[in-house]
Image: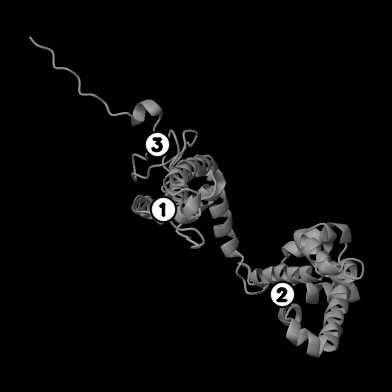
Amino acid sequence: MNTTGVEVPARPTVTPEAERFGKPSSGWRRAWFEIIFESQTRAGRRFDLLLLAVIIASVLVVIVDSVSSFSARHGTALNALEWTFTVLFTAEYLARLVSVERPWRYATSFYGIVDLISVLPTYLAFFFPELHALIDIRLLRLLRVFRILKLTEYLTEISALGDALRASRRKILVFICTVLTLDVLMGTLMYVVEGPKNGFTNIPVSVYWAITTMTTVGFGDIAPKTGLGRAIASFMMLLGWGILAVPTGIVTAEMTHRRLGVRAGGRSCTRCGTDGHEASAQFCAVCGAPLPTTLESQPIEPAATKSG
């Protein structure tokens, strides 16, 4: 209702799917689109929840089928269920293509590719039986739960984490190179100290032991026997605990750096005191006051008092 008291009809909301793939204007294709793509409707939400349940059931069938004892007794039933799920997913994929105005755009989208490769392994298993295990890729379709349960805001946090990892890639690369160098040195040292008689048959095997020890995995297939070797191993275990915290600190510092908006050349607002503005910013992001120039933001030295 506007200021004149006349009720104004609400504008229809345009979903991202409708804007990207094209929503039919009318007819049965429009009805299918609302059910298949728009989870905010009751029918669409029920369809998506039913689809997720079928996806989970199909993956469980593949997992159970991998157990030889169970597959030997119920192989026929499991095979029938698998083909039933494949036919359902194929029909659903074709229905998605038919119910949009731009089917090629949907087919080349992320979910379109996942929907396609979720049905291909069953058909390709006729010619390549080893591909049958790839049917578990249907689990990727469970990513739709973010859209169904309104969890899309978490994708923003994932994007922020990805940005922090990309910004820290050089530091992390240097860290990995440093750790690898230490593993090679310590592995070579253990090869000299322990030798082949204690399981350290060559330097690559010794480096493998150093990596598993420094990462605190410790499979136990190779272990030092001498006192000096055990002392080196203890030092590496303690060093591993400290090293594990380094990449976490790098990424955390970068995320904090981005969250606070601290950048090179940042300036402070003289009105509210907010800092971290970029060098090209002209107004404060909090109070809107004009930001001082570089000369204005520098502290002013008191003028010298003239004598006489």
Q: How is the image coloured?
A: one colour
Q: CA distance from mark 1 to mark 2?
A: 47 Å
Q: Is residue 10 visible?
A: no
Q: Which quadrant of the view contains residue 3?
A: bottom right
Q: Which quadrant of the view contains residue 118?
A: bottom right
Q: Give the total of numbered labels.
A: 3
Q: State left or right for residue 215 relative to residue 21.
A: left
Query: Label 2: few (<14), some or many (≥20) within 10 Å?
Result: many
Residue 128 sits above or below residue 267 on the image: below
Tell me what residue is drawn at x 36 percent, y 25 percent.
Answer: 295
Q: Nearer the viewer, mark 1 or mark 2?
A: 1
Q: Position of residue 201 (x, y in %)?
A: 54, 49
Q: Position of residue 286 (x, y in %)?
A: 42, 48
Q: State left or right for residue 283 relative to residue 7.
A: left
Tell me what residue is drawn at x 69 percent, y 75 percent.
Answer: 40
Element carrying mark 1 = helix
Q: CA distance from mark 3 to mark 2?
A: 45 Å
Q: What residue did someone put label 2 on?
A: 39
